[in-house]
Image (spheres, rainbow, N blue to C red):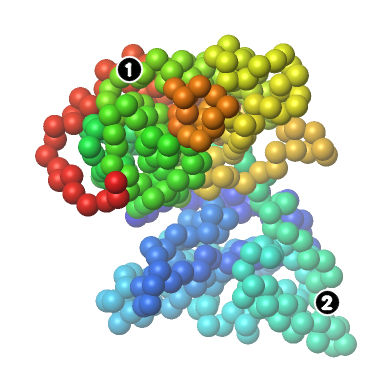
Amino acid sequence: MPSLISSAEFAARRQALMRAIGPDAVALVPAALHHRRNRDTEYRYRQDSDFYYLGGFAEPEALIALLPGRAEGEFVLFCRPRDREMEIWNGYRAGPEGAVANFGADQAFVIGELDQRLPELLAGRRRVFAPMGTEPGFDRRLTGWLNTVRARTRAGVQAPGELHLLDAALHPLRLIKSAAELDIMQRAADLSAEGHRRAMAVAAPGRFEYELEAELLHAFTRHGCPAPAYGSIVGSGANACILHYTENDRRMQDGDLVLIDAGGELDHYAADITRTFPVSGRFSGPQRDLYEVVLAAQLAAIDAVKPGASWQDPHDTAVRILTRGLVDHGLLAGDVDGLIESGAYRRFYMHRTGHWLGMDVHDVGDYQIDGRWRPLQVGMVLTVEPGLYVAPDDDSVAAHWRGIGIRIEDDVAVTDGGRHVLTAQAPKSVADIEALVGAGAGVPGSIVGGAA
């Protein structure tokens, strides 16, 4: 599937990175590896986000070299050769010719020539920017290339003397999204919201969590998402209190809440939505009380997103409202300020209120600069996802609160006017949820298998 990002934008990204590293440097970006699923099968391939960001090239066994000011060409791409037999078995390859014609490479070589050619490209460069510490095989090869150049220093060849993490130069660029990126993320958010609506509509006591997951996957794939952006969480009853629950195999019961945290990935850009709703279609009194607290905290935290605000502001806003609600409903006792200072609220709210979102669901970018929380800027995208989780075995609270887990999450872009909620199409008010849940529960489907 061709990228939704234009070739001109990919070229602009490469130029921005080369300006950031300087004229005496080289940036090396390896493609993602294939990973074995079991025996002789592999997981579906997904390109490394940094690599795809710079080239839009989705094939494995490849490497990008960016060499500012190089007369023969600044963008060099190593990739697999064309191979008719392998293409019959595994699909089309661009080859070096396609890398130049279709992906903007100034020069392209087969990946088998990497060890021969890369030391030549490194010679004369003072600094190397590359990912380090994430893939040992690449680290070893990089050391070998550098040693090959160093071995020629007596012949007057200048070897790189500095090795830098690529992250420091590239990730600030990825943190600020372009208009084209925001358009893709909006589409990913819309189709993900459709999945959540479908799941709500078919929810009913007696169905299994994985049946709701199937509705999510249907919505994602029918719109061109090759896969979810991350492992979908469909946790009913006490499973909603497990933050990263992914078994999704419990039969849902009357009176349960179900927490769904799921989003699709479109052209390597993620959506990330969480909704919590009653399986039976109606919140109980205690469920509604805590849900309204979380929703109030989330709406206020979203309102705190604006240019110039601190990254911490939405979190602090949410924590205050959640803590106030816990006191009002008798789950905590004491002064709100004191409970926040002591961290007493963390018994029921143990995670942060959000994270960066983009090509990775937990996207790149520092949250602090020089020890201070980063100010929000136009083009940043973050999640806002407060929650409350009352452990099912917490006998220090009244029985009617136990086992309630609630999280509400939206994707929010920082704009000139403040903010734009990308995921607004996913219902979250009590009235909207109760109107939708179970509306399509009579659709044909087998309810068999799974764990009780």
**Mark 2 residue crowding within 10 angstroms, few (<14) / some (14–19) / many (20+):** some
The residue lying furthest to the left in this view is: 444
- Going by the picture, which residue comes out furthest to the front? 395
Nearer to me, 337 or 266: 337
Would residue 295 appear left or right of 174 to someone viewing this image?
left
In the drawing, does residue 36 fall left or right of residue 330?
A: left
Judging by the rendered image, the residue that carries numbered circle 2 is: 158
Residue drawn at (59%, 49%) of the image: 13
Q: Circle 1 — which element?
A: helix
* Residue 432 numbered tag: 1
Of residue 187 and residue 17, the one placed in the foreground of this image is 187
Q: From the top left corner, tell me how far across and down residue 197 is, in percent.
A: 30, 30
Horizontal side, residue 444 vs residue 116: left or right: left
Q: Quadrant of residue 328?
A: top right
Q: Residue at x 51, y 35 (%)?
A: 393
Quick one: label 1, few (<14), some, or many (20+) residues within 10 Å?
A: few
Q: Residue at x 28, y 29 (%)?
A: 254
Q: Helix, strand or loop at disc 2?
A: loop
* 2 or 1: tag closer to the N-terminus: 2
| Quarter occupied by residue 18 | bottom right
